[in-house]
Amino acid sequence: MRRIAGMLGALFIASAMAMPAVAGEEEMVALGTNREEAVSKLLSRLDKCEPQEMQETAYILGEAKVHAAVIPLMRMLHEGEEECRVVAALALCRIGDARGTFAVKQAVRFDKSERVQKLAAWFYDQYVKPGTYQFVSVDAAQSAPVAGR
């Protein structure tokens, strides 16, 4: 649990530090001013930029709950680098579209990275359907077995 919390903290700190690069568009999306233009620019960034910028953009699209980003974020969840897949899972859960949340649920089962699987499960549990996944600390798991599993 501590490890997951540490990873989440590091992810959010890194995202927050990198946000000024796209903060102007984030403000436009949040305020609804030229939203269409801002969303279009953000969506085009998902395919044409470096992984760090892709992560920033995915985070912004998730926070703004841009439903038009679901398909590109699903592609990022399946094809991106590990960090990109983590942020894509978070963004898809924040948006809440059924297609995206189903993709996150599949990543929990099938992603090649255990880290992505665990974080995708955590995001799904936090933003989509609480109680879907059971999280047990390493200490508790070693001292007492989980009943019914």
Image (cartoon, grey):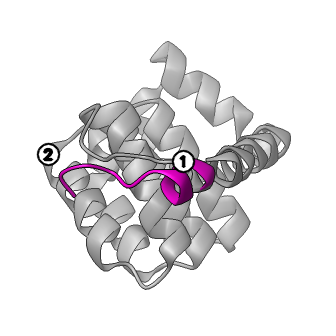
Q: Report x, y in % for residue 125.
A: 34, 39
Judged left or right of residue 25, residue 41 is: left
Residue position for label 1:
140
Is 66 located above or below residue 88 in the figure? above
Q: Secondary structure at mark 1?
A: helix
Residue position for label 2:
98
Q: Report x, y in % for residue 11.
A: 71, 50
Mark 1: which amino acid? Ala
Q: Quadrant of the C terminus?
A: bottom left
Magenta-span inclusion, residue 146:
yes
78 and 126: which one is in front?
126
Q: Residue at x 59, y 56 (%)?
A: 138
- Range drawn in magenta: 139-149
Q: Residue at x 78, y 49 (%)?
A: 10
Mark 2: which amino acid? Ala
Please count the marks in the image: 2
Please identify the quarter of the rendering in which residue 127 is found.
Answer: top left
Q: Nearer the viewer, mark 2 or mark 1?
A: 1
Residue lying farthest front? Answer: 143
Residue lying farthest top? Answer: 31
Q: Is residue 44 visible?
A: no
Please identify the quarter of the rendering in which residue 109 is found.
Answer: bottom left
Q: CA distance from mark 2 to mark 1?
A: 33 Å
Residue lying farthest left? Answer: 98
Is 135 located above or below residue 65 in the figure? below
Q: Report x, y in % for residue 88.
A: 46, 58
Q: Secondary structure at mark 2?
A: helix
Q: Is residue 50 visible?
A: yes
How many C-alpha atoms fall within 10 Å of the one at disc 2: few (<14), some, or many (≥20)? few
How many C-alpha atoms fall within 10 Å of the one at disc 1: few (<14), some, or many (≥20)? few
Q: Residue at x 36, y 77 (%)?
A: 78
